Structures are given as structure tokens and as C-alpha cells.
Image (cartoon, helix red, strand yellow):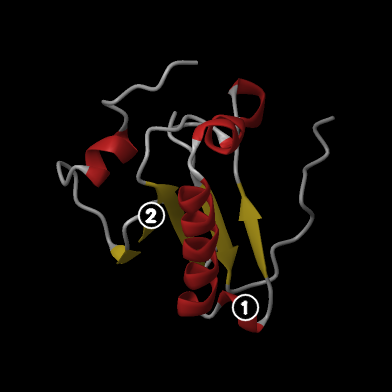
């Protein structure tokens, strides 16, 4: 899948669409999800044009990878998600229901999150 520079996260990175920013640095942007699935629901996205985890790991520079991982940790710490537990989720492709074709990690917490996968098979 080719990167679409008009996806919603690319527009957020360019400042064309506002977000409720948690923090931003040279490598990543963390912001609150507009449709949260838990009391804590933050998205952390790399600033580079990567579609998925495998695209990111195969094509990003080492400093981008470290920068994103540190941004995820900062989101966990800054939201207080580490206090009672949290979940990191990254969906890739149609079967995983990836909705935005820009690599992103969901940080969820703030309550018991239940079983990781449903029973749909």
C-alpha cells in the first residue's frame, strides 16, 4: 500500500486539522483520540510517511524508531496509564481494521480493558 499524503494524520501533522495535542517532538506527535475507547486513549504517530509497522521498521532511520518508542513511553507516563496498566495497539491492513493509512500506536488505559480479542473467530 502506498502512502497517501492526504490521510487525516498527515493533515494533522501539517496543521490542517486540529488535534488535542499531548506533546510533539522532532520524531512524533501524540494526541488524544477523538473517539476514545477508554478513559485514556492517545494516538502516537511518527512524523515520517509510513503506512504500517513493517513499513516503519523497514524504512525509518534508527533515530526515528527510537524517537517514536520514546514518544510512546512519554505518552504512557504523561497520561498516568502506567499506574494501573495499559495496552498498546497498532492495526495494520484490512483484516486488522486499520482505518488511517499512517502508522500509529494507540495507548489505552484508565480502566480494566478486558480480553484482548473478541470471540469472532
- Mark 2 and mark 1 lie on one chain; the one further toward the N terminus is 2
Q: Is residue 109 left or right of residue 117?
A: left
Disc number at residue 110?
none
Question: Dot 1 corresponds to which residue?
Answer: 82
Q: Is residue 2 left or right of residue 52?
A: left
Residue 13 in picture, x, y percent from top left: 25, 45
The reply to whether residue 77 is visible in this rendering is yes
Mark 2 surroundings: few (<14), some (14-19) or many (≥20) residues within 10 A: many
Of residues 61 and 75, the one nearer the viewer is: 61
Helix, strand or loop at label 2? It is: strand
Above or below for 84 versus 28:
below
**Mark in front: 2 vs 1:** 2
Helix, strand or loop at label 1? It is: helix
Mark 1 surroundings: few (<14), some (14-19) or many (≥20) residues within 10 A: some
Of residues 80 and 73, the one nearer the viewer is: 73
Within the image, what quadrant is residue 48 found in? top left
Disc number at residue 28?
2
| Disc 2 from disc 1: Cα separation | 20 Å
Image point (53%, 48%), residue name: 62
Image point (63%, 84%), residue name: 83
Residue 108 in picture, x, y percent from top left: 57, 62
Above or below for 12 versus 100:
below
Report the number of numbered marks.
Answer: 2
**Residue farthest toward the left in the current orientation of the protein:** 16
**Residue farthest toward the top in the current orientation of the protein:** 1
Residue 1 in picture, x, y percent from top left: 50, 15
Quadrant of the image for the C terminus?
top right
Image point (41%, 47%), residue name: 46
Within the image, what quadrant is residue 101 found in? top left
The reply to whether residue 37 is visible in this rendering is no
Image point (53%, 36%), residue name: 56
Amino acid at each position: 500500500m502506498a502512502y497517501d499524503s492526504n490521510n487525516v494524520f498527515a493533515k494533522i501533522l501539517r496543521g490542517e486539522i486540529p488535534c488535542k495535542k499531548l506533546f510533539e517532538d522532532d520524531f512524533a506527535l501524540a494526541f488524544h483520540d477523538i473517539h476514545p475507547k477508554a478513559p485514556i486513549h492517545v494516538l502516537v504517530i511518527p512524523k515520517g510517511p509510513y503506512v504500517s509497522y513493517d513499513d516503519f521498521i523497514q524504512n525509518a532511520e534508527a533515530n526515528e524508531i527510537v524517537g517514536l518508542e520514546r514518544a510512546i513511553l512519554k505518552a504512557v507516563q504523561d497520561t498516568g496509564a502506567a499506574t494501573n496498566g495499559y495496552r498498546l495497539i497498532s492495526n495494520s491492513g484490512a483484516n486488522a481494521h486499520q482505518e488511517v493509512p499512517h502508522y500509529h500506536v494507540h495507548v489505552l488505559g484508565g480502566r480494566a480493558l478486558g480480553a484482548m480479542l473478541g470471540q469472532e473467530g
